[in-house]
């Protein structure tokens, strides 16, 4: 369960007590709540119920499908959320904007189990790992229907590079069976830049215009730019080729296998390189249930 999204890298408890008049009955602790805003399709069934059963903390759970959606809510203020899941490259500028509060690591003993390599890479965006802890990481690559791919490219055909996406003639072969790409410039444009031999992290206007022009040339073969729906479409055979997040594509593989519908899905890490992303748990500066947020994170 890993859907977006960072720069290219090659490859917890306070109780609110109810107060009342003089009574022979003991004061009752207020209901403990944590408001959690997470990516769609990004947590296993039953996990939150198990957390509530173990801690007594009720989880109010909402989802989003784009970093921009999360950032808009946070910048507007008074979001009402206690835990959110920004991607690393958004996290960096959000820290600068004082959107988050520092973590109390004394309440997060499980940080000791974090993968050091991921922690080190996250520190590029959050120096000292003060504001966020990694939740999920993954890659942005190419998912495809293996049977359809062989029908279109031949029995020895394979997908191993970005040319299948950014060469208009090659992508056109898949138009009829359904092509979908993420509605995320932070994923698609770096891939296009890399394909063109340019720095995938470039912010130069000329470079970005070249990448945008490349995407425009393949646009006629793309059925939809959307960051939701392709998981189901790939699993059912409704679409055959996607640029998507590794976690979603792996979920599609599992769903297809569970339904035994004859769909077999492959995932390609392009030989030219692909984007590695880090999605992280952070606590907004305005969070009201901070102790509960730390318990959820731990």
Image (cartoon, rainbow, N blue to C red):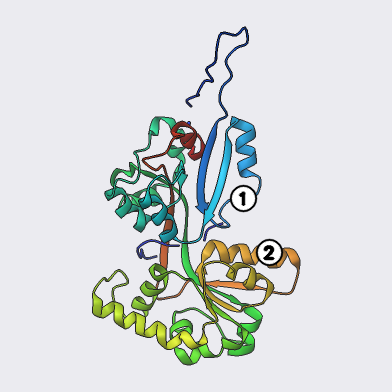
In x, y percent, where is residue 129?
Answer: 33, 44
Q: Name the residue: 62% across, 32% down.
A: 54
Q: Name the residue: 36% across, 63% down.
A: 9
Quarter placement of the N terminus: bottom right
Judge by depth and name the residue closer to the eye, 193 or 96: 96
Judge by depth and name the residue closer to the eye, 115 or 88: 88
In x, y percent, where is residue 101?
Answer: 35, 40
Asked which quadrant contains residue 7, the reply is bottom left
The answer to whether residue 252 is seen in the rendering is yes
Judge by depth and name the residue closer to the eye, 25 or 200: 25
Q: Name the residue: 55% across, 50% down.
A: 62
Residue where numbered disc 2 is placed: 255
Does dot 2 land on a helix, a strand or a loop?
Answer: helix
Asked which quadrant contains residue 53, the reply is top right
Q: Is residue 153 above or below residue 95?
A: below
On the rendered structure, is 8 left or right of 152?
A: left
Q: Is residue 7 above or below residue 30?
A: below
Judge by depth and name the residue closer to the eye, 181 or 164: 181
Asked which quadrant contains residue 152, the reply is bottom right
Q: Is residue 93 above or below residue 258?
A: above
Q: Name the residue: 63% across, 66% down.
A: 252
Residue where numbered disc 1 is placed: 44
Which of the two labelled residues, at mark 1 and mark 2, occupies the earlier sequence position? Answer: 1
On the rendered structure, is 88 left or right of 165?
A: left
In x, y percent, where is residue 59?
Answer: 57, 40
Does dot 1 land on a helix, a strand or a loop?
Answer: loop
Mark pair 1, 2: CA separation: 14 Å
On the rendered structure, is 164 left or right of 131?
A: right
On the rendered structure, is 218 left or right of 260?
A: left
Q: Please, which residue is most extreme toward the bottom here?
A: 169
Q: Is residue 3 above or below residue 85?
A: below
The answer to whether residue 154 is seen in the rendering is no
């Amino acid at each position: 369960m890993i859907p977006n999204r960072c720069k290219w890298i090659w490859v917890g408890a306070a109780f609110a007590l109810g107060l009342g008049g003089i009574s022979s009955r003991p004061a009752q602790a207020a209901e403990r709540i944590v408001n959690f805003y997470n990516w769609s399709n990004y947590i296993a069934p039953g996990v939150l119920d198990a957390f509530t059963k173990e801690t007594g903390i009720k989880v109010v759970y909402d989802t989003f499908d784009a970093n921009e959606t999360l950032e808009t809510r946070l910048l507007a203020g008074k979001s009402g959320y206690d835990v959110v899941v920004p991607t690393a490259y958004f996290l960096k500028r959000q820290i600068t904007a004082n959107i988050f509060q520092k973590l109390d690591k004394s309440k997060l003993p499980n940080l000791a189990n974090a993968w050091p390599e991921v922690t080190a890479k996250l520190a590029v965006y959050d120096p000292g790992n003060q504001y966020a802890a990694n939740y999920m990481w993954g890659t942005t690559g190419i998912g495809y229907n293996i049977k359809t791919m062989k029908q279109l490219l031949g029995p020895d055909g394979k997908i191993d590079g970005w040319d299948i996406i950014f060469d208009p003639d090659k992508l056109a072969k898949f138009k009829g069976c359904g092509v979908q790409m993420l509605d995320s410039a932070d994923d698609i444009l770096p891939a296009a830049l890399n394909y063109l031999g340019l720095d995938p992290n470039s912010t130069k206007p000329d470079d970005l215009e070249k990448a945008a022009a490349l995407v425009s040339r393949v646009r006629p073969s793309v059925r939809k730019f959307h960051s939701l729906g392709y998981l189901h479409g790939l699993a059912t055979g409704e679409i055959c080729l996607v640029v998507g997040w590794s976690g979603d594509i792996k979920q599609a593989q599992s769903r297809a296998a569970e339904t035994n519908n004859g769909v077999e899905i492959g995932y390609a890490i392009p030989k030219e390189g692909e984007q590695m992303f880090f999605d992280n748990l952070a606590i907004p500066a305005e969070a009201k249930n901070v102790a509960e947020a730390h318990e959820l994170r731990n």
